[in-house]
Image: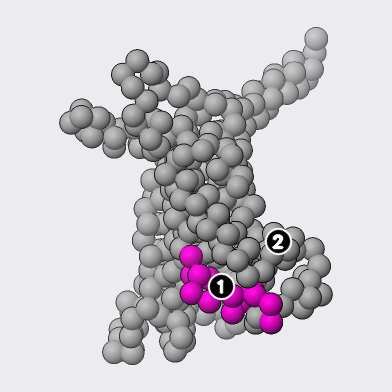
Amino acid sequence: MSAVGRYLGELNAAVGAGWNRFWYEPAPATTLGVVRIAAAALALVAVAAYGPDLIAWFGAGGMLPVPLVRELYPDHLSLLDYVSGSGLWVLYAATLAALAALLLGVGGRVAAIAALVLTLSFFHRAPLVTAEFEPVVAFLLAYLCIGRVSDAFSPASRFGGPSKSPPSPAVSNRIAQRLIQIHVTVVHAMMAVAMFAAADGVWFSGEGIWLAAARPEGPLVDLTGWENSTKLFALASHLTTAYFVAFPLAAWSGRLRPLALAGAAIVWPLLAVVTGKVLFCLAMAAGAAAFIPAEWLARAAEPTAAAD
């Protein structure tokens, strides 16, 4: 065999091994457990918010009549299209129950699929009032259906008994985690591109955070007294821009991943405060948590286990 042939054979073997290791190496459910808790909690809050005006939104003669929504969004399927009155309350209660089960880690994949279908029914029934948050929490819930998400941070994993061995790593956990990681990376990259395309280069001139906070309906706190802190806002804008530009690459590097996760822990709460888009920012932080190595979480849990 020629040197070129040997090289191509070795390259093919290396690429194949790397591909299989990336997608199919069994992984524990620990990291998915963290994402599961966060995504389920956020979806629970979002769906629960419909409760006080459930009939006003979705009932017969409500603000979002089925014919109008179907005309504008013919591809949106929702179980709520087929019920009214007491049926709405039944589906509402079932959705909250499914999300609570997923949050607690009860019901495994059945609870995850039920939570996804029922939550999407609410999102698809009210597309006129959804925003950035709903698509993010939707893909998190969808990918969680693939893994064995109840194998960590759940009653079964906690109180399974002294003779019960811990759940073994699974290929499905790896696939679910990789899909979340890739999707979150793409969202970060798209937001970085949007920053480059922003009018007058406000994110690179240091005005991005200030302009986001200057919207009257935006920030969670009144920042009008900070208008003279231009250097502070410029620093925050530059660091935020650097985070979005760097995250799509740094998150995949073992050496740089701690910096990427630290950036996520700072930037997303900051954006939640200055933009007021709390659920979206928390959902993105939950997605970024998919990059937390399971070993870190295992080490963090060791003192608790020792205390028990």
Neighbour class for label 2 at 10 Å: few (<14), some, many (≥20)?
some
Mark 1: amino acid: Leu
Residue 261 x, y percent position in the rendering: 41, 50
For residue 54, the mark is: 1
For residue 296, side relative to residue 91 (left or right): left
For residue 148, side relative to residue 80 (left or right): left
Range of the magenta residues?
48-61
Residue at 33% x, 22% y: name it: 161
Residue 47 versus residue 276 in the image, above or below: above
Q: How far is disc 1 from disc 2 in space, using C-alphas?
A: 15 Å
Q: Residue placed farthest to the left in the image?
A: 307
Residue 50 x, y percent position in the rendering: 53, 70
Residue 3 x, y percent position in the rendering: 76, 16
For residue 31, side relative to residue 57 (left or right): left
Residue 46 versus residue 171 in the image, above or below: below
Q: Identify residue for label 2.
A: 78
Decide if residue 298 is in sight here. Answer: yes
Residue 205 versus residue 23 in the image, above or below: below
Is label 1 in a helix, a strand or a loop? helix
Neighbour class for label 1 at 10 Å: few (<14), some, many (≥20)?
some
Is label 2 in a helix, a strand or a loop? loop
Residue at 34% x, 29% y: name it: 159
Q: Earlier in the sequence, mark 1 or mark 2?
A: 1
